[in-house]
Image: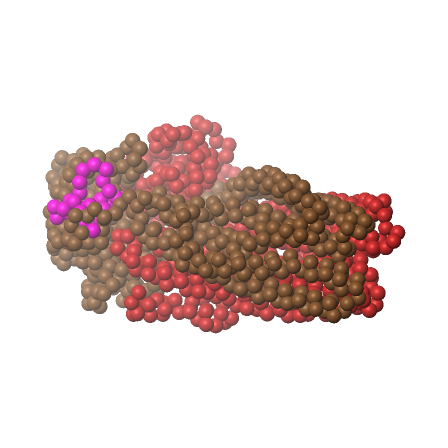
Chain colours: A brown, B red
Amino acid sequence: MKRYMKYVRPYLYAFILGPVLMITEVVGEVLMPSLMADIINVGALNHDVGYIVGKGISMIGVALMMMVGGIGGAWFASKAAVSFSADLRKDLFQKIQTFSFANIDKFSTGSLVTRLTNDITQVQNLIMMSLRMAMRAPGMLIGAVIMAFIMNRQLAMIFLVILPLMVVAVAIVIRTAFPRFTILQKKLDALNSNIQEMLTNVRVIKSFVRGSYEEERFAHSNADLKQSGLNAFKIVIIQMPVVMLFMNTTTLLVVWFGGNQILTGRMPVGDLTAFTTYVVQVLSSLMMLAMVLLTSSRAIASLKRITEVLDTQVDLTDENARYGQVPVKHGKIEFQNVSFRYYKNSEEKVLDDIDLVIEAGQTVGIIGSTGCGKTTLVSMIPRLYDVDEGKVLVDGIDVKDYSLKNLRDGVGMVLQKNVLFSGTIQENLRWGDENASEEALLEASRSAQADEFVQNFTDGYETELGQGGVNVSGGQKQRLCIARALLKKPKILILDDSTSAVDTATEAKIRETFRTTLKDTTKLIIAQRITSVMEADQILVMDEGRIVGRGRHEELMKDCEAYREIYDSQMREEVLA
Amino acid sequence: MDQARKERLMKKYAYAQTAADAPGAGGPGPKAGRGPGGRGGRNMPVKKPANSKQAIRRLFSYLENDIGKLCVVFLCVIAGTISMLAGSYMLRPIINSLTQADGSSQKLFRSLLLMAAVYAVGILAQYFQQRIMISISQGALERIRNDLFCKVQRLPVRFYDTNNNGDIMSRFTNDLDAVGDMLNNTIVQIISGVINITGTLCLMLYTNVWLTIVTVLMVPLMLKLAGMVVTRSRRFYKAQQAALGTLNGYIEETITGQKVVKVFCHEEVAQEEFEFLNYDLRDKQIFAQFFGGIMGPVMNGSGQISYSVTAIVGGILCVLRGFDLGGLTVFVNYSRQFTRPINEFSMQMNTVFSALAGAERVFKIMDEEPEAPDSPEAVTLDPCQGHVVLQDVTFGYNPDKTILKHISFYAKPGQKIALVGSTGAGKTTITNLITRFYDIDSGSITIDGIDIRNIKRENLRSNIAMVLQDTHLFTGTIRENIRYGRLDATDEEVEAAAKLASAHHFIRRLEHGYDTMIEGDGANLSQGQRQLLNIARAAISKAPILILDEATSSVDTRTERHIEHGMDRLMATRTTFVIAHRLSTVRNANAIMVLENGEIIERGDHDELLAMKGRYYELYTGKTELD
């Protein structure tokens, strides 16, 4: 809780003024009945019209005060709640920006999005509700009880008996309902995933003619959902009759004891009217509190999920970098006995004792079956993950000793699962270098063989890309991603299976420009196709986290079994021919 | 943030800006539409739906079976409301008798007993009314969901290709939630509100005509005030929703691409843009929430004013006209009861509007044209040989854009036909036509000599097994997923199919083997493993025709070579259509069709095509693009 004070402090006045102004509503609410009692007890009984009008006008005054107070309270409450959550969202987003890849993997992007959107909204709603109810419900409860005591001590004792009983009853209802709602939520999730599956798998369902099978499955989870809905609501609806029962009982008791007091002349008749109003006020404010409690449980779950993100230890920082000012100058890469696993307690190492030297300016091809650790290997260079054992050096300096900014500026990486963002093509390319000249932009685009097709679009580089780059084909997208990385003018360029959708001829052209224009850049190319890496200065063949072969194509053909096998699977007919 | 960048952001999100300046104008722009922004505003003003009458009628058709129960609910509402009114009215004689000489404890006790009985009736009526209503509404919702699901399922594939899954999904969730809210509460509240107002009005008239007139005169004032608040809150709410949509869209996009953001050290830029949108939302939201929040105080305050005016006039009436004190007491309580339902009505209107809008969206899907029924002459192929002939087939997804032009080829039972060509050439379209996901525009497709339009659709499809590029699995065990191909397959057959697809090995290594649960479309398996399961699922089906659409694209070449043997066995007895990006996988086909722009430009087997030195040769030797 303490950490959230920092979001309250700048708006402390609003956090205080909101509830305070709401007090006017409470005060008015409890004053009204007693003014009314005065009109009856004094004005009507004494036939004093002036008194009645006077009291009546002060009632209108109180009503106006309530309205103004309520409006003011609403203003500060929304100011406080909205500003609080805007600042919280900002910090949450900022925190996620500092996350390492491992942190992101742990949360999954979908859940991070939910936390930034839905969860924050939940918290905001809770704060808003609390600020408006904070004074109102308890204030009214206490105010009404106090007024009741002032008016008639003996009669007010009834509250002291009824209130605890009612609290217990409502608590029982809520506690019974709660787990049932959890079940309801689960059934709802199950039903939704059922629908989701049907929507994405419709071709499968139709081609296997499983329509009626799916309908049965759905009907089953639908009936399940209905039953748990009934189970949950069944309990909730008891609440209202229970409260009514208490309220009516109290009214009866008040009228009985009050009536007897009136009969013996110990109480004026107007007080009874006021008292019955207090009964309603006390019990309804209790209802309100119960409702806040019930709804807050969801928001508290959201707050927990937010706290979880804020509390996450970012496991990869450059705080201890010894050469924070040094940029990557040449692009020589060394791996010294590097081992890595994604989960600390998992048996299998993803990288197992890797030793490797890549000279600046070399072209290195990496090949191997899926899951053998190729992507993991190159991820160590821009320090997307930290090694468990061993060291990764760039230009002889441990990557941990660079500032992340300098290191990643020096290493251009085209990810396997790559994304373009909504905006123009030009805006996307400029991610590589915001201030790049027009000439540099075109050159990078040409090197990635993207210029030609971009020029063919009506709007050229100003063409708007949809979210995720939806209006370009797979191969075009990959080429744009390469251009984006080239614009950075990195010392080390990593292409992680980034030309898989580009045809071999275009890919050959890209390789050719790399050879001529990126002579000094160290290039690491992960590929499925053996032709993509055949001409590299050094080819690494990986299998189950180890390098099982390294050398030039001819060397590997001679003495690497795995390499030959891959080669055969792709090039068999050439061998036959 | 420097000025230039700020200006750039202002320009980029120009829509969001204008929405603030002139919130009333225009619908959501292209940017505001994305992201999960449009939810969660149930308690905010909603636009009145266009065709509410019809939606209401259809909604109520789901309650037809419950007419009896609804009548009971109705009676309960009446009983409950009357007893509540009666309960509060009974205070009048009690108070009056207390102030008169003949008042006594016994008399008081008797009156209170009667009151207690009335209260008890009220409470019971209220409970039963809610209890029955819950079971009615949950039942109706279940029926609507079932109808919607069955309906959606029967829609042609075209519908899925042209509609966004998220949108259909939200009809099941958000829209039906709104309908549920209305069924659960609103109907009863409206009925009881109406009875309440009428009853109170009658009692007020009975108690005192002049005071009633005073109270009723206050109503237009209250409605006017409420109207003023609603207009403003609707305007700011719209601006808020637009800003929220933009921000949520930005969040979704950035967080999804977070790894790219990091690789490009773009964190600060992202943060800047985020903050711009975040504070834009804040500035609009404060107003939206404020106007949403003042409805309560304004209505409450004006109710209190009405109460005060009644008190003054009532007090004067007591003095001048001898109006009884008990009457005054109950009357001021009535004036509160009278304004409360009016208050509630204005709140309920939002629920009603969003429920009707939701119902309309739901019914709109239900009204979509389903797949055309089989013609009465349709036959079943029993058994199907798998002789497929396409004759001069022409087709386009839209009438104005032809995808396939005059395609003709045939596949004899057991043959393997490969379709090769770049994206958009029409390869997948051909498989869509053979399965009748879409119907051809001209030409004919026959299986065993019978036009597929004259074969019962279910029969046709059950004779075709498909493995698609996008691997789709269902929640359930691996065993169940494989068995999806043939529901009566034995465990041994499941394992045999898995072995055929080279999936047996990895399945055995999973913690629970074949009983491992697959969740979230198989997120716990690699893409290649999911494809192997899909192949196993097709293998278990005994369909004589097999379609492999990029079925092994995510399996690396080494593994692909290992499963080649199994695939060959699978294809040996079936007529197979193969679409593949990697030409190595189609080499041993009986015939290869090279498609370009919807036409077959070359055909023949591998060696013939290579000898032709045409397009296939170029593709094969990597001289042209296959994209």
- The answer to which quarter of the image holds residue A357 is top left
Where does residue B18 sit, x and y in percent of width and height?
A: 44, 71
Q: State which region is magenta.
A: A378-403
Residue B263 shows in the view = yes
Residue B591 shows in the view = no
Q: Is residue B459 magenta?
A: no
| Residue under the image location 70 percent in, 67 percent down | A56
Q: Is residue B415 left or right of residue A202?
A: left
| Residue under the image location 61 percent in, 51 percent down | A141
Residue at the top extreme, as displayed? B492
Where does residue B548 sit, x and y in percent of width and height?
A: 38, 44
The residue closer to the viewer here, A324 or A340, is: A324
Where does residue B539 sit, x and y in percent of width and height?
A: 41, 36
| Residue under the image location 64 percent in, 70 percent down | B224
Residue at the right extreme, as displayed? B102
Image quadrant occupied by the C terminus of chain B: bottom left
The residue closer to the viewer here, A509 or A109, is: A109
Where does residue B28 sit, x and y in percent of width and height?
A: 47, 65
- The answer to which quarter of the image holds residue A184 is top right
| Residue under the image location 23 percent in, 46 percent down | A383
Image quadrant occupied by the N terminus of chain B: bottom left
Q: Is residue B411 left or right of residue B219?
A: left
On screen, B619 above or below B485?
below
Q: Is residue B82 left or right of residue B254?
A: right
What number of labels is visible?
Answer: 0
On screen, B229 above or below A203?
below
The residue closer to the viewer here, A131 or B387, is: A131
